[in-house]
Amino acid sequence: MKKCKITVMKMARYEDLIEKYENPIEHACDMKVGQTFVANGWQKPDGMCDSAWDSMSAFVMALSHGAEDFYDGWMKNKKSAMISCNDGFRPVSFLIEALNEDAD
């Protein structure tokens, strides 16, 4: 099984939707652009948001077991995926890449 590198690529924030629909939240997201995590297949990396992990874990699991070329040519790097968390108010985009090294 291969390890997967997960990199925070972009963060958005939709103030209009937040003001109209969301109850005030004091603390919503700890991610930072450029932040990286390494996943050992099914195991959520320390510090990874639970909601983000729920959105990406199937892709991480597939890549760690050798899957590639999701959706027939979607990604330039066949051993990667670009996944966003499911927060409709402040989505975060993550690049997931299979590494050449095996997980311990």
Image (cartoon, helix red, strand yellow):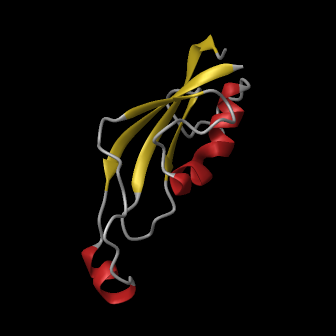
* Viewer-proximal residue among 25 and 97: 25
Residue 64's spot in the image, x, y percent? 67, 26
Q: Is residue 9 above or below residue 1?
A: below
Circle count: 0
Residue 23: quadrant of the picture:
bottom left
Residue 81: quadrant of the picture:
top right
- Residue at 64%, 40% in the rendered image: 59
Work out whether residue 71 can be spotted. Answer: no
Question: Farthest residue toward the top?
Answer: 101
Residue 78's spot in the image, x, y percent? 58, 28
Residue 8's spot in the image, x, y percent? 38, 41
Quarter of the image that includes the N terminus: top right
Quarter of the image that includes the C terminus: top right
- Residue at 29%, 65% in the rendered image: 13
Q: Is residue 57 above or below residue 29?
A: above
Q: Is residue 90 above or below residue 70?
A: below
Work out whether residue 64 can be spotted. Answer: yes
* Viewer-proximal residue among 99 and 24: 24
Q: Relative to residue 55, is residue 95 drawn left or right?
A: left
Question: Farthest residue toward the bottom?
Answer: 20
Q: Relative to residue 9, is residue 38 drawn left or right?
A: right
Question: Farthest residue toward the left?
Answer: 15
Q: Relative to residue 29, is residue 84 drawn left or right?
A: right
- Residue at 33%, 80% in the rendered image: 24
Residue 41's spot in the image, x, y percent? 67, 30
